[in-house]
Image: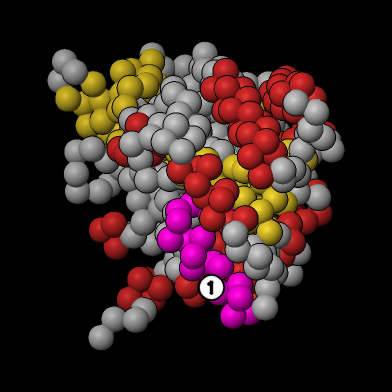
Amino acid sequence: WPRTSSRTEGALTVGGVDVRDLAGEYGTPLYVLDEADVRSRMRDYATAFAGSEVHYAGKAFLCKEIVRWLAEEGLGLDVASGGELAVALSVGFPAERITFHGNNKSVAELTRALEAGVGHVVVDSYAEIDRLGRLAAEHGARPKVMIRVTTGVEAHTHEFIATAHDDQKFGLSLNTGAAAEAVRRILALPQLELVGLHSHIGSQIVDTAGFEVAARRLAALLVEIKDEHGVVLPELDLGGGYGIAYVEGDEAPDIKELADGLREIVSHVCADAGLPVPRLTVEPGRTIVGPGGITLYEVGTVKDVEGLRAYVSVDGGMSDNVRTALYGAEYTAVLAGRESAAEPMLSRLVGKHCESGDMIVRDLHLPADIAPGDLVAVAATGAYCRSLASNYNYLPKPAVVAVSGGKARVIVAGETEDDLLRGQI
Ligand code: LLP
């Protein structure tokens, strides 16, 4: 739950605002973001990684207001599309603090990145090295590039979000020699400035051992590059992927320990080989915005499936949070608008979409007197919920409201029926 959440008069409050007031004012479903929580996590990272760069991974949740918070807290930004880049540039975020990612950036996207002068482009394929080389020459630009290296580390997470094994679409493999070949190709192009290596092993990873192995392998590759080419690359980008707690008992890595561990490993490998310590960058997304977000829903129906469980249906579902359906993600939900002394009842929190996989929380206990009109809050929905939202069944995407100091304000407006019909003949 968000750092500022508590119960007052039986109802959940976040940022000093009662969820009943939020639902009354803005309707449901509603994404609620605790500004103090998110900003404090940005600061925690900046402190733990002092001397390194922290680039927030915008894919977790991006909007203009988040970009302003990043600018104010001194973080950088990782974008993975021209659209994400456009959000950042629209509020004047400094382009040199942006890293551009993606396994299939288009010519238009790369051109936009060059024109804006983004700080780094992380190249992901030979084809992209050629493409970026050609565009850079055309534009008279000399972008700083990093190579996305597939380190072969086994990340213990869902298959769809594990990215360091060889048999997936991202990166250039360390094992097969593709990463070393990419180094050769980039060094042969004077219009590209190779400054470092990048790795991202996956997401929602709790065991930090994998990050350390990846960091060691990247640092070792820096040493090999020095030996083979006489070139000292000054930067390593270690990606993101640090896990958060979604349900009771979940563990989450300690950011300070993680930072110290990564720094130590890289320093060691480089010092042993007589190399200067490279500047490190990390790219946390989920850990910054995830815990500070909740989703508020209103219960519409409660169906007791005799002998099995109660199905509690709310007014959103897989269109505003697809993670349960997509990854089998686990969440915590509570009755939020009032306290109840009723017996806990085995339940499943489901949405209103036309498929049975439309679940938000697969197994949970809710008070037996839960009824239509009750408010339910789901915890830790700040990351990868709004950003993965869809209009399935023509549901409008809910608004995002930031709460702080007893006040709420809309930072992303909810969609309307007009929005849904726009552009159709
Ligand atoms: N850097 C790169 C290059 C990435 O691909 C990602 C995430 C991150 C940083 C940030 O990872 P984080 O710290 O947020 O774990 N939709 C999935 C997560 C996909 C993550 C994709 N890349 C989910 O809902 O779990």
Classify residue 33 as left or right of residue 314. Answer: right
State how many labels appear. Answer: 1
Q: Magenta part mainly helix, strand or loop?
A: helix
Task: Give above or below for 180 relative to 213.
Answer: below
Residue 132 among magenta residues: yes
Q: Would residue 379 be seen by someone viewing this image from the given angle?
A: no
Residue at the left extreme, as displayed = 306
Depth order, front residue of 385/43: 43
Q: Would residue 419 be seen by someone viewing this image from the given angle?
A: yes
Residue at image point 51% right, 60% down: 129
Depth order, front residue of 217/305: 217
- x and y percentages locating residue 46 in the rendered image: 79, 38
- x and y percentages locating residue 137 in the rendered image: 61, 76
On whether ligand 1 comes within 8 Å of the CB at mark 1, the answer is no
Task: Give above or below for 180 relative to 81.
Answer: above
Quadrant where the C terminus is found in the figure: bottom left
Quadrant where the N terminus is found in the figure: top right
**Rendering quarter of residue 364:** top left
Residue at image point 44% right, 24% down: 154
Q: Which residues are magenta?
A: 120-139
Residue at image point 40% right, 73% down: 419
Q: Which residue is mark 1?
A: 134
Amino acid beneath label 1 = Arg
Depth order, front residue of 277/405: 277
- x and y percentages locating residue 188 in the rendered image: 59, 59
Residue at image point 81% right, 54% down: 72
